[in-house]
Image (spheres, rainbow, N blue to C red):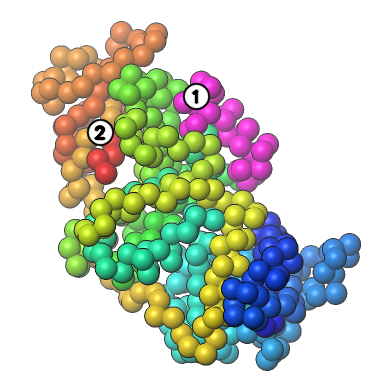
Amino acid sequence: MKVAVMGYGTVGSGVVDVIDTHGKLLAKRTGGEPLEIAHILDLRDFPDDPHSELFTKNFSDILNDDEVKIVAETMGGVNPAFDFTKRLLKAGKAVVTSNKELVAQKGLELLQAAEEGKTNYLFEASVGGGIPIIRPMAQCLAGNNIVGIAGILNGTTNFILTKMIEEDMSFGDALKLAQDNGYAEKDPTADIEGHDACRKVCILASLAFGKHVYPNQVATEGISNISLEDVAYVSSANGVIKLLGQIKYINDDSIAAFVSPAVVYNGSQLASVRDVFNAILVRGDAVGDLCFYGRGAGKLPTASAVVADMVDCAKHVVRRKLFGWGAGAEDYVIDHKATVEMPFYVRANVSEEQVKGIFGEVKFLTRKDQPSDEVAFITGSMTENELMKRLDGIHTLNIIKVTNY
């Protein structure tokens, strides 16, 4: 079966490598149909690549090749990936992708295009890299109502926080090390400000509850304001700071979804997730708690998920998989700051007496060389709006949510 790859960057080249390396194995898993790469689309030249004769800069070469049945889209971004994918799907070609930004923004339209073209649009690699999470949620957990999801969804931020926690490295130094190691881009904004994790939250929420969730509906906060002082205070409470994406079922017409730094106590499975690894906790009403753990990014882990979707499409050439979600609504994702109660970590330049007057009993935290005019504490459960109302007038604040998953 002829296939094509659009985008020959880290993931796209990995897809080609996996198909080359595991050709015989893949043929067994498709029922005898080998995956044969017919075209590789990229605007760059690769004259020394062993597949140089397969390269094209013309999208029409893929669209108009009737023998190409499956296309891997590993271009990244929304444009021109959206236009290319939509046209392929409407033409009846299955498309698989690792492009989380595209799925989060345009997934509903592309699923509808796949239905129109009587083909499949799959995106296992868009969340968690090589970690199987999309297919288990869609198939293995079909007998459950999903109660909640919480996860470390970005390896770059987890690497940075690991260095801060374990090696007392500043945020800036840890970010530079992540860039030097190839974990962070030259412009790391999407990672450190939580946008990457937000896109993955959108995909997981859409799949779990059947209604499309858009990035602008998900309140998002990154880790750029986390300091070594915060790390030290939280350590005294037997916890660590992680960037979490969280989704909570409210009712059939509303959910809460947000991305933020959170204090995770050491008894949680998420607390022990180090470096660039990801972990996703899913709670079903029948199955209870499940944890999906592994490499959340990288050339071959992500490529393995892309190729797995290609194999799945090869098995479903003559029939569509029942997969995806429907339209969402503007008010579907509620304002979690006004409705979701949880404890909070607060660091501020106030006295313990002032804190007790505002909150009553709290858990005070300590650190080495703690200034006499600085306190850090963990509150009882309340909404974030209630927290801010109580803290009104105190301007030197650092606030982190405390996960109660």
Counting from the top left corner in percent of width and height, residue 267 is at 32, 32
- Dot 1 corresponds to which residue? 166
Residue nearest the observer in this picture, 99 or 279: 279
Q: Amino acid at mark 1?
A: Glu
Counting from the top left corner in percent of width and height, residue 50 is at 85, 65
Q: In the image, is 236 to the left or to the right of 306?
A: left
Q: Is residue 303 visible?
A: yes
Q: Main secondary structure of the magenta part?
A: helix
Q: Residue at x 69, y 60 (%)?
A: 14
The magenta segment: 161-186
Determine which quarter of the picture holds residue 23: bottom right
Task: State which quarter of the image contains the N terminus.
Answer: bottom right
Mark 2 lies on a secondary structure that is strand
Determine which quarter of the picture holds residue 21: bottom right
Q: Residue at x 74, y 66 (%)?
A: 20
| Res. 344 mark | 2
Q: Earlier in the sequence, mark 2 or mark 1?
A: 1
- Contact between marks 2 and 1 (CB within 8 A): the answer is no
Counting from the top left corner in percent of width and height, residue 323 is at 40, 76
Q: In the image, is 27 to the left or to the right of 235?
A: right
Q: Is residue 68 above or below residue 254?
A: below
Q: Amino acid at mark 2?
A: Phe
Task: State which quarter of the image contains the C terminus.
Answer: top left
Which is closer to the viewer, label 2 or label 1? 1
Report how far apart the C-alphas of labels 2 and 1 lie in the structure.
23 Å
Mark 1 lies on a secondary structure that is helix
Mark 2, Cα crowd under 10 Å, few <14 / some 14-19 / many 20+, is: many
Q: Is residue 113 above or below residue 217?
A: below
Mark 1, Cα crowd under 10 Å, few <14 / some 14-19 / many 20+, is: few
Q: In the image, is 231 to the left or to the right of 90?
A: left
